[in-house]
Amino acid sequence: MSKSFIVGVIIFSLLVVIGSYFLVSGGKQNSTSVKLVSYQLKDKEKPKVQAKVLFKDMGKIKVSDKKSEDFVVKNIGTRPLQFSQISSSCDCTVGQVIIDGKESEEFGMHSQSDYVAEVAPQKQAKIRVTYRPYVMPVYGPVDREVYLTTNDPENPKLVFKVKAYVK
């Protein structure tokens, strides 16, 4: 066997291993090293979520369109507010967390992730709900939701709803 053949086999093997890693991981590194912190209702120091708008009407859209709406969520508490377990009601809808202009990955109906987003006290984040009718084509009035869990003991679950008329 020639040296070039052996080098070729080694390079090919490395490419297979690296390619397998990206295939399995989706090419994304673990996005969090933050531990979930829980609080009790009786705690004086705790996060407190404020989301004034939980519903938006996207209006009329074509089945081939994609539309997004952003919801503002503030932490009016005294400890960091955490979001986790983000998912949606349908494969055609995804949610994202945006903090300081940095967008998380998209989370859909079957998302299982250890992602944790953290909002400092007196700061805010955006929850982006994106609806893609072409993924699960339906026509007429449609309601979709994005769900997330918080560490605010008064509001442990948030639901962001959008509606649209698909034509």
Image (cartoon, rainbow, N blue to C red):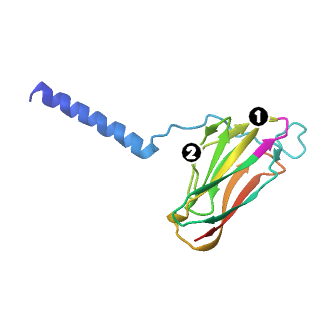
Q: Badge 1 is on which residue?
A: 120
The image shows residue 117 at horizontal and vertical percentages of 67, 40
Q: Residue at (9%, 27%) from the top-left corner?
A: 2
Q: Quadrant of residue 161?
A: bottom right
Q: Badge 2 is on which residue?
A: 105
Q: How many marks?
A: 2
Closest to the observer, 94 or 67: 67
Element under disc 2? loop
Q: Residue at (70%, 45%) from the top-left corner?
A: 126
Q: Which residues are magenta?
A: 73-80
The image shows residue 30 at horizontal and vertical percentages of 54, 38
The image shows residue 9 at horizontal and vertical percentages of 20, 34
Q: Residue at (62%, 58%) from the top-left corner?
A: 88
Binning the other alpha carbons within 10 Å of mark 2 as few (below 14), some (14 to 19) or many (20 upward) gives some
Please report whichever mark, 2 or 1, sits nearer to the chain's N-terminal start: 2
- Is 160 left or right of 68, judged from the image as shown? right
- Amino acid under label 1? Ala
- Amino acid under label 2? Glu
The image shows residue 135 at horizontal and vertical percentages of 51, 63
